[in-house]
Amino acid sequence: MALGWKLYGDGKTPPVGESVAPDERLSWPRTIGIGAQHVVAMFGATFVFPLIMGLDPNLAIMMSGVATIVFLLVVKGKVPSYLGTSAAFVGGVLAIRANGGNSGDVVGAILVSGVVLALVGLLIQAAGPRLVNAVLPPAVTGAVVLIIGFNLAPVVANTYWPQDQWVGLATMVFVILASLMLRGFWARISILLGLVFGYLLSALLDATAGPITSVLGGATEATTHDRLDLSGVGSADWVGLPDFTAPHFSVNFSLLVLPAVIALIAENAGHVKAVAAMTKRDLDPVLGRAIFADGLGTVIATSVGGSPTTTYAENIGVMAATRVYSTAAYYVAAIVALLLGLCPKFGALVNAIPGGVLGGITVVLYGMIGLLGAKIWKENRVDFANPINLVPLAAGIIIGIGNVNLVFSDEYSLGGIALGSIVAVAGWHLARVVAPAEMRKSLAAEEGFAGGTGPALGSTGRHVVDAGGADPSDLDRNDRSR
């Protein structure tokens, strides 16, 4: 693929009703400016989720740039997208750590999921996009997304929130108000603004109210400490490589994060459909490539200790606001991310985010992840009066949220997100086979609405896009929650 772009008109912002195509670009100064907007849009979630998973946010930022470049090359520049850190793996990663796994075990397990996702992409490219709906209909995808989000509730309650409940509460309220009262681009970065607010509030309270006594994340006893500890920032270098971690592979740990692949397939399908609607192009032929590229990006990132990747709706929002779909801007964003990853002082500043602030952020984020599963159901009119949808999905959801375990031996058990997802997926397909004819007939009508000729639109907990070929002008409004 050539990396050349045609100059759009005179290189200035397109007039109302016009847009810059993926293979076009504005003048380089304007392209760089839009690329910087893409960095800001993806930034908050891309470094928050590595923090939550116990991975290096600096490395995550850097490898997100690498993964984005790989993605653009694989899809031949037809799908403008930024690959940031995926939230779909958070629950599985926390389960790995709860079972004694370290960062090597975490990235090894995610790497395996990346390989599986890449293979699924190759299969879809060969068999066609209809395969997505056949195996993962909206009813099942929504259930898996809901499980992934709500399974994380105990992490907020037991790890982050208790570190500083009042800062957590203030941060949560700020994020809610910012997402509702701000407009456009600022509303889409409400999470990032909430982090800045909580950071500054913690510093202010340290200066005025003094230290706090609480149990820090990972500790067992309460200690007296400052909310914001910047000691590591002063000693960090301005330029240097982040810390790399070699992956370690375990079948048990790999199974804990594998259900996230289901969510990522739906997320990529939704992303491709949204971009197709915005650019008025048929992108179904490259859906398999996009899923393969996402899997490949995850494999590359985790092979050195980075975080899993996924396509970002925050950046769809930037495209909707600017009407610039040029992949040149994404290459600029990727290069900026690479440079940020080479600044250890920046990483130390990120790592200093107080636990109470993360509590206020995650109480919103985790809930949004779960509710995005419900949004998939609503947009695709999933009928829960039909026992095919109701019974197996109800069982899977309770197993996933309640961390129910199925113990096979002292060394191996299956539970939480993994078991809940398996029950939801396998149970739904089994119910469809054994159900009476009238139930199957009702389900067929539902599937016809959901779009039997293409992939269902949905989310993995990182973002959600409109179903049913929404008007591109509506995407900015629909993405305001992130």
Image (cartoon, rainbow, N blue to C red):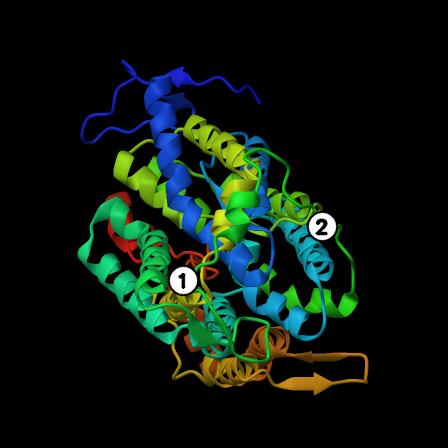
In this orientation, does residue 467 appear?
no
Classify residue 404 as left or right of residue 104. left
Measured along the vertical axis of the image, is residue 51 above or below residue 8? below
Q: Percent x, y for residue 307?
A: 60, 51
Quadrant (top left/top right/bottom left/bottom right) for the N terminus: top right
Q: In the depicted view, which residue is nearer to us: 360 or 210? A: 210
Closer to viewer: mark 1 or mark 2: 2
Amino acid found under the numbered disc labelled 2:
Thr
Q: Percent x, y for residue 172?
A: 32, 67
Look at mark 1 in the image and give the residue it sits on.
450
Classify residue 156 as left or right of residue 249. left
Q: Residue placed at 38% from the left, 33% from the top? A: 36
Q: Percent x, y for residue 190?
A: 31, 54
Q: Circles 1 and 2: CB distance less than 8 Å?
A: no
Look at mark 2 in the image and give the residue it sits on.
245
Classify residue 288 as left or right of residue 208. right
In this orientation, does residue 270 appear?
yes
Q: In the depicted view, which residue is nearer to us: 332 or 289? A: 332
Q: Residue placed at 69% from the left, 59% from the top? A: 103
Badge 2: how crowded within 10 Å, few (<14), some, or many (20+)? many
Q: Residue placed at 33% from the left, 73% from the top? A: 166
Q: Percent x, y for residue 131?
A: 57, 56
Residue projecting furthest to the top: 10
Counting residues from the start of the chain, the first of labels 1 and 2 encountered is 2
Label 1 and label 2: CA atoms lie apart by: 42 Å
Measured along the vertical axis of the image, is residue 464 above or below residue 98? above
- Secondary structure category for the residue under label 2: loop
Q: In the depicted view, which residue is nearer to us: 347 or 116? A: 347
Q: Residue placed at 39% from the left, 22% from the top? A: 24
Q: In the depicted view, which residue is nearer to us: 77 or 402? A: 402
Locate residue 383: give its quadrant.
bottom left
Amino acid found under the numbered disc labelled 1:
Ala
